[in-house]
């Protein structure tokens, strides 16, 4: 499970498209719109909005689409022929991708805080994990729930003669 | 059956599967013996893949049963599907490490490189899987099926859509796998390839086994000059 998690984390860190939507695009919008509209209240809302934008961007592109791509490539079908459970695989995938999502949200929040002098709220930051916990789950649950149900329905037909 | 041990590792009896009331597999018997290369051939939609999926536990048969030589067949069977279920963002070596983790196996760097070399991928160890050629990707999926040193490996159309050189390389890999003592079960539409590789052939058509035996036995029994002719002869009704 740990090896799977590590490998999936490496894969998530190399997912350029998802990182673009979760880090590069929010940072570009942050500095672009933040420079254009100097109102402190607007900037505070902008940072919050772009943190959410980045988190949802990675949850959708990095986790939801990745599950769909894996399904198309037959990863879940193959997993059913191995001793590794699909639930454990999805757990490792969600954990790895969730960690990258958390980091990307914190990068955007920290950049906004430093660039526009917005006070850092630890209480606000503490709310990130519960949001993260629900966002990636929402994106993969619809895509992968049928695989898990298919696994429970398909019993390994084994009559042993050993 | 020349050169094949008599005790089957996998013995499937009377496998039957219906989809929406339509019979797809009708009482198929299939046995896999240690170290052999078994080819399962037949037209598209003949029931080959469904039969193999029932043997692999991916589908539940409506009737029939599969007997395995071991209590936990999933730890002893390697599978290469027609799809390419690797992780594109990871290198070839990292992919093999992940697949090994699915079987609870931790591979050392040396073991990984040896496995990659076995499948002619030593130069691609650090290349992202998505950047590999079609032939290399196919070899990677075969290497992924070998990470836990299975006793039986199932290859679903391992040479489909590959150029002649890539086909030749995969045939060599299959021969090497067999020589190492692993039984190989593969499906193919290339009868020349089947004749060259297989110790035994099972021809499935319209969900039933139409012929089973060594290529030489089948050719002699049906009065044809090669497997291609045999295939055309025995699947003629399905084509009509």
Image (cartoon, rainbow, N blue to C red):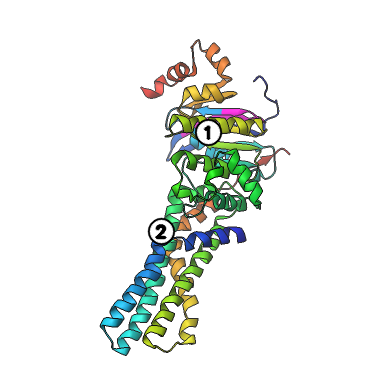
Q: Please report the bounds of the magenta region as a residue range.
A: B24-38
Labels 2 and 1 in the same subunit: no
**Quadrant of the snapshot with the C terminus of chain B:** top left
Q: Nearer the viewer, mark 2 or mark 1?
A: 1
Badge 2 density bin: few <14, some 14–19, many ≥20, Cα 10 Å? some
Q: Position of residue B127 (x, y in %)?
A: 50, 50
For the residue pair A25 and A150, the one nearer the viewer reads as A25
Rendered view: A56 above or below B90: below
Q: Is residue B193 visible?
A: yes
Where, by quadrant of the figure, is residue A51 drawn? bottom left
Query: Is B27 part of what is drawn in magenta?
Result: yes
Q: Position of residue B72 (x, y in %)?
A: 67, 45
For the residue pair A44 and A31, the one nearer the viewer reads as A31
Residue behind mark 1: B170
> Which label was assigned to residue A65?
2
Residue B180 falls left or right of residue B145: right
- Residue at 46 percent of width and 87 percent of height: A121
On what subunit does the disc labeled 1 rest?
Answer: B
Residue A24 falls left or right of residue B23: left
Badge 1 density bin: few <14, some 14–19, many ≥20, Cα 10 Å? many
Q: Position of residue B188 (x, y in %)?
A: 48, 30
- Residue at 46 percent of width and 77 percent of height: A106
**Quadrant of the snapshot with the N terminus of chain B:** top right
Rendered view: A151 above or below A115: above
- Residue at 70 percent of width and 29 percent of height: B7
Q: Which element carries disc 1, helix, strand or loop?
A: helix
For marks 2 and 1, give the CA distance.
32 Å
């Amino acid at each position: 499970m740990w090896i799977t998690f590590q490998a999936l984390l490496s894969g998530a860190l190399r997912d350029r498209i998802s990182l673009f939507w979760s880090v590069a695009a929010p940072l570009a919008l942050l500095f672009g719109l933040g420079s254009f509209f100097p109102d402190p209240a607007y900037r505070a809302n902008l940072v919050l909005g772009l943190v959410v934008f980045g988190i949802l961007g990675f949850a959708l592109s990095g986790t939801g689409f990745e599950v769909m791509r894996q399904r198309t490539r037959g990863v879940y079908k193959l997993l059913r022929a191995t001793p590794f459970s699909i639930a454990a695989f999805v757990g490792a995938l969600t954990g790895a991708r969730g960690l990258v999502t958390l980091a990307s949200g914190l990068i955007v929040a920290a950049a906004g805080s430093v660039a526009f002098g917005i006070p850092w709220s630890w209480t606000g930051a503490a709310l990130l994990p519960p949001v993260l916990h629900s966002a990636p789950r929402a994106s993969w649950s619809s895509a992968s729930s049928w695989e898990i149900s298919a696994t429970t329905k398909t019993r390994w037909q084994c009559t042993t003669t050993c | 059956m020349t050169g094949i041990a008599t005790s089957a590792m996998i013995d499937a009896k009377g496998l039957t599967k219906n989809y929406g009331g339509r019979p797809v597999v009708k009482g198929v018997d299939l046995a896999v013996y240690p170290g052999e290369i078994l080819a399962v051939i037949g037209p598209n939609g003949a029931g080959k893949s469904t039969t193999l999926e029932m043997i692999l536990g991916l589908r539940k048969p409506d009737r029939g049963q599969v007997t395995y030589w071991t209590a936990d067949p999933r730890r002893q069977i390697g599978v290469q599907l027609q799809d390419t279920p690797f992780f594109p963002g990871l290198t070839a070596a990292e992919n093999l490490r992940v697949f090994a983790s699915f079987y609870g196996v931790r591979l050392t760097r040396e073991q990984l490189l040896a496995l990659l070399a076995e499948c002619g991928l030593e130069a691609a160890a650090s290349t992202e899987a998505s950047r590999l050629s079609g032939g290399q990707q196919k070899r990677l999926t075969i290497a992924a099926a070998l990470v836990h040193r299975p006793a039986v490996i199932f290859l679903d159309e391992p040479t489909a859509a590959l150029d002649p050189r890539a086909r030749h390389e995969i045939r060599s890999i299959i021969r090497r796998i067999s020589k190492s003592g692993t039984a190989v079960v593969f499906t193919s539409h290339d009868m020349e390839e089947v004749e060259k590789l297989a110790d035994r052939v099972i021809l499935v058509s319209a969900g039933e086994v139409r012929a089973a035996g060594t290529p030489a036995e089948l050719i002699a029994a049906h009065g044809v000059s090669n497997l291609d002719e045999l295939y055309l002869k025995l699947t003629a009704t399905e084509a009509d």
